[in-house]
Image (cartoon, grey):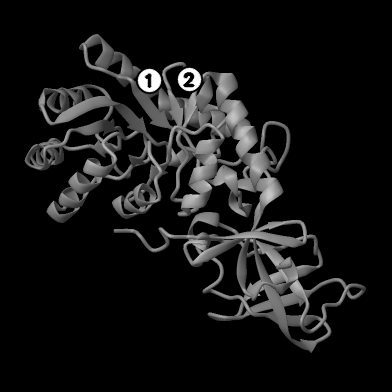
Amino acid sequence: MRRDEIPTPALLLDLARFERNLERMAAHVRRAGKHLRPHAKTHKCPEIARRQVAAGALGVACAKLGEAEVMARAGIRGLLITTEIVPPAGLARLVRLLGEAPETLVVVDHPENARELGRAAAAGGVVANVLVDVDVGNRRTGVAPGASTVELAREVAAHRSLRLRGLQGYAGQCAHVVGWEARRAASRAAMASLMETRGLLEAAGLPVEIVAGGSTGTYDIDVELPGLTELQSGSYCVMDLDYRRIGGRSGDALTDFEMALTVVTTVISVPAADRAVVDAGFKSFATDRPFPPEAVERPGIEYGWAGDEHGRLTLRDPDRPVRLGERIEFFPPHCDPTINLYDRVWAVRGSEVEGVWEITARGRSD
């Protein structure tokens, strides 16, 4: 099948760019002496996860238990569930998952959750591998760094059905700081508390085999920390406008990884010389960012939202009009929630379709 035969709107993955992104990140963590457990919340696609593992990743991180269940059923191992699991029904599902993939890591940030997790694991005859989730300034989940983390880690280590493996600290507030030097300063300040807390655990004789964190925005900053063992970067494999705009070490755009993800659309109306309409609107792109999709290699086109299934194009270049039926690709503002809108991604190489990969964990926020 040819690329120009794909029904629109559709999600496309440029395989050449995607593969180079995987290779670059794998080489980066190898040089730094770190490990990579990329976040599958970005793509929710077992085939992409398989390729990340084949490129050297330890496994994948999953934001939710539902994602982890999908990945485990697809044969992916080395899972880390980065969000606390609290409801009894969720703990029961987790125990079943641990029976299938016993090396799976989970996080806790409260002693009551640790105790309930331990009871569920004991009742199910499994041992849960645990990271203590530390708040490094993101003000989302996580126990306070320092003494509170040590206290919780002691409780985890004391339970016979829990195995303390280390710490997680996600500085999400730093991931999109614009400007590399500003981002580096913000990340180093945030992660300092995690490194100090690691030292406190070690001084208390508690195991700290794993210290996980990081993002695509700080991928080349956090590896400077000797106490960090693995990165959780996710978006690097496909990229988006949001990450591109934060800047790299030597420019206003983060170009270390290539823009591999696009949404292909069709022009379905040309009501005026300076205006056209495509068949992709709110239901085809995530709308959580203050900037619109960007037309690929068409600088004279400005996209505007025009409803659930329509996008309004303002045509700024009179020398390059659009045609009815023309196909135009767009870079999405935010890759993760855009991917979650689709059942499949079309894997393309040049003008040919090499595969159609199911986004099996789409909607699995449970």
Which residue is denoted by mark 2 in the rendering? Answer: 225
Secondary structure category for the residue under label 2: loop
The quadrant of the rendering that contains the N terminus is bottom right
Q: Determine whether label 1 and label 2 are within 8 Å by CB.
A: yes
- Residue in the image at 58% along x and 31% along y: 26
Residue 322: image quadrant is: bottom right
Q: Is residue 286 visible?
A: no
The quadrant of the rendering that contains the C terminus is bottom left
- Residue in the image at 37% along x and 20% along y: 195
Residue 246: % across, % down: 62, 43
- Residue in the image at 86% along x and 71% along y: 317
Q: Residues within 10 Å of mark 1 (few under 14, many from 20)?
A: many
Position of 337 relative to 223 (above/below) = below
Give amino acid for label 1: Met
Residue 207: % across, % down: 26, 17
Position of 204 relative to 267 (above/below) = above
Residue 258: % across, % down: 68, 45
Asked if residue 69 lies left or right of residue 187, the reply is left
Q: Is residue 135 visible?
A: yes
Asked if residue 200 lies left or right of residue 221, the reply is left
Asked if residue 192 lies left or right of residue 181, the reply is left
Q: Give the CA distance from mark 1 to mark 2.
A: 8 Å
Q: How many marks?
A: 2
Q: Residues within 10 Å of mark 2 (few under 14, many from 20)?
A: some
Which residue is denoted by mark 1 in the rendering? Answer: 195
Residue 5: image quadrant is: bottom right
Judging depth in this view, the residue of 276 and 121 nearest the camera is 121
Secondary structure category for the residue under label 1: helix
Give amino acid for label 2: Leu
- Residue in the image at 53% along x and 31% along y: 56
